[in-house]
Amino acid sequence: MTFVVASQAYGLGGIYGPEELKFRAGAIGGQSPVGGYWVNWEDVFFYAGDAQAFNQFIDAYGGFKRCKLEVVIHRGPKQAAAPWKELDVAADWSLYVWNTGANFLPKIQRNEAGEAPSEPVDLEPIGEPAPTRVDLWISQRLKLADLRVPMALNVTAAKDAAQDGEIQKFVAARALAAGPMESASQAQTDVFRLMVELSDGSRLKGEAKDLKKLPLQTALGALSVPLEQIAAIESASEHASTTIRFRNGDRLTGTVNAGEWSDLKIETVLGVLTVPTRLVRICEIEPAPRRAAVTVRASGTWQTETPDKAFDADLATDWNSGSYAPAWIEADLGAPARLATLLLLPCQDIAGATTHEIWISDEPIGDDRAKARLIHTFQGETHDRQPLQYDFSNDLHARYVQIRTMQSPTWIAWWDVDIRLAE
């Protein structure tokens, strides 16, 4: 067992011997690892072989169930290495597994005497979904043209291949073959908070998604008014006339085309209700808080678990500081903005007492909190993927938001950090 020390990041780790490799990694697609190591709950296994061997491996890897599957391409060759020492083998690809001791286990366990199986075994992921990643290094032995990577796998170029034209072309060609994909911002659904008063005096509050523009016939002609510009809609009996109050203070009166604006589907505490618009007398509209687009930095990073992965809305990727508390991650909103809600999802493989402080400022914070303001502290027993939510007070504005962890039983990491902004 090794005590790993790197930039004041501490953890337990070790190099796997041949028998341990058979037990922990087995054979995937007929390929057995030539080396490997572990640090805390993370395993990395190294493999050597030509394109045919890799294709057999990656085809089997693509069939893993209940796992996050990812392929990252580097320019090789690669010398296998643990964070604290090089191994005496060359590698063509590697497999990373975050296993928590249960997510990625061999089908065949050790016998009662504690002996490893004599033959390699296949891996079978069990329990909660396990983040995994295959890194491959392109070289004379492993050429891109000879690779057969299943289209279901997510393939990206490593940062060290950002200027590598051949790798970038390979990744782009796969994306084109897979068809267009929406970005997170494009896929974001428009959500509006509504307060609706009906003709019988009833009042409802809730959220509505994908509302159409309001079709209004006015003295100025037919208009189509975007909902995000509207503060309230006031209608006379049976929509004989409708008045729109805009967010900038303007008012406009006309009649609504009932055929294009017939029903409202509102998610309320009673469930989703369908409200005929002919019954609506007043409808106040407020856009729901939106996920902020940010740039991000942190006190540290473990391998490829970079700070941006806490803000990518992908709950299978995370930022890992590579260290125990104190550690922090900080978002830059680009300009002071009105804060609405903070939603946190901890990546915490050991349950226990934690303390997370929320700091805000109009200037970068980092390790110097002299000009920052502490506005909330989460303190208590927490566990992996336990949601933490804080609703900011009204009219609170800031450009920088920092989550600083002062206590935790594990390395500091977040699956997701979601800062919501009020309109």
Image (cartoon, rainbow, N blue to C red):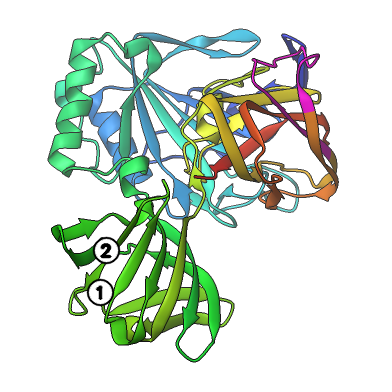
Q: Which residues are magenta?
A: 355-373
Residue 355 appears at what percent x and percent y?
84, 37
Q: Is residue 305 visible?
A: no
User: Is 416 on the left or on the right of 69, as rendered?
Assistant: right
The amino acid beneath tag 2 is Lys
Residue 248 appears at what percent x and percent y?
41, 46
Quadrant of the rendered image containing residue 166:
top left
Q: Which mark is residue 212?
A: 2
Residue at the image point whose x is 32% and y is 12% from the top: 161
Q: Which mark is residue 261?
A: 1
Which residue is farthest front?
219
Between 321 and 45, the one lying in front of the other is: 321
Quadrant of the rendered image containing residue 168:
top left
Residue at the image point whose x is 52% and y is 46% from the top: 315
Judge whether residue 77 is colored magenta: no
| SS under mark 1 | loop
Between 39 and 47, the one lying in front of the other is: 39
The amino acid beneath tag 1 is Trp
Mark 1: few, some, or many residues within 10 Å (few <14, many ≥20)?
Answer: some
Asked if the residue at tag 1 contacts the one at tag 2, i.e. Cβ–Cβ closer than 8 Å, the answer is yes
Between 121 and 279, the one lying in front of the other is: 279
Residue at the image point whose x is 58% and y is 55% from the top: 128
Residue 90 appears at what percent x and percent y?
43, 11
Judge whether residue 368 is colored magenta: yes
Mark 2 and mark 1 lie on one chain; the one further toward the N terminus is: 2
Residue 139 appears at what percent x and percent y?
27, 11
Residue at the image point whose x is 48% and y is 75% from the top: 196
User: Is 332 on the left or on the right of 368, as rendered?
Assistant: left
Above or below — where is 394 with respect to 312? Answer: below
Q: Is residue 396 visible?
A: yes
Q: How many marks?
A: 2
Between 364 and 122, the one lying in front of the other is: 364
